[in-house]
Amino acid sequence: MHRFTQIISIVGVNPCVTVPLKIAKTFGKKGFIPVRIKVNGHPFLANLVPVGGTGFIFTASCERRPWLR
């Protein structure tokens, strides 16, 4: 298991994170990566989707979006 802390940015409508390179290399380059995340103290399951380099967008349902503000 990998752990890291990162600030979430919003690009368009998508929440995005930059994953540390050492961790990103273990994910590979394709497909959805299931992860457990915690945003403002609220844990939930999400999927990371690679967007190039060490950038990933993650899925967050509408009811979870207020936690991202």
Image (tube, rainbow, N blue to C red):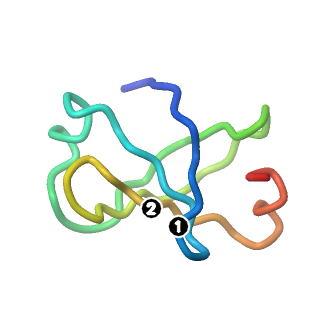
Q: Nearer the viewer, residue 30 or 67?
A: 67
Q: Quadrant of the N terminus?
A: top left
Rendered residue at 33%/53% (across/down): 55
In this rendering, is residue 34 above or below 57? above
**From what the image shows, is residue 57 above or below residue 35?**
below
Along the line of sight, the residue nearer the viewer: 56 or 42: 56
Who's the residue at 43% across and 53% down the image?
34
Residue underneath mark 1: 11
Residue pointed to by mark 2? 57
Number of other residues with Cα within 10 Å of mark 1, as a class: few under 14, some 14 to 19, many 20 or more: few
Relative to residue 14, is residue 41 drawn left or right?
A: right
Picture residue at 60% right of the left edge, 51% below the top: 45
Q: Position of residue 20 (x, y in %)?
A: 30, 32
Q: In the structure shown, which secondary structural element does the residue marked by tag 1 occupy?
A: strand
Q: Secondary structure at mark 2?
A: strand
Q: Residues within 10 Å of mark 2 (few under 14, many from 20)?
A: many
- Res. 30 image quadrant: bottom left
Q: Residue at x 55, y 56 (%)?
A: 46
Q: Which mark is residue 40?
A: none
Marks 2 and 1, Cα distance to the nearest angstrom?
9 Å
Location of residue 1 with respect to 64 vertically, above or below: above
Label 2 vs 1, first from the N-terminus: 1
Residue 19 location, x and y as percent? 35, 39
Q: Are marks 2 and 1 in contact (CB under 8 Å)?
A: yes
The answer to whether 2 appears left or right of 8 in the picture is left
Q: Amino acid at mark 2?
A: Ile
Across and down, in percent, residue 42 comes to 78, 39
Taking 68 as reference, is 21 left or right?
left
Residue 62 falls in image quadrant: bottom right
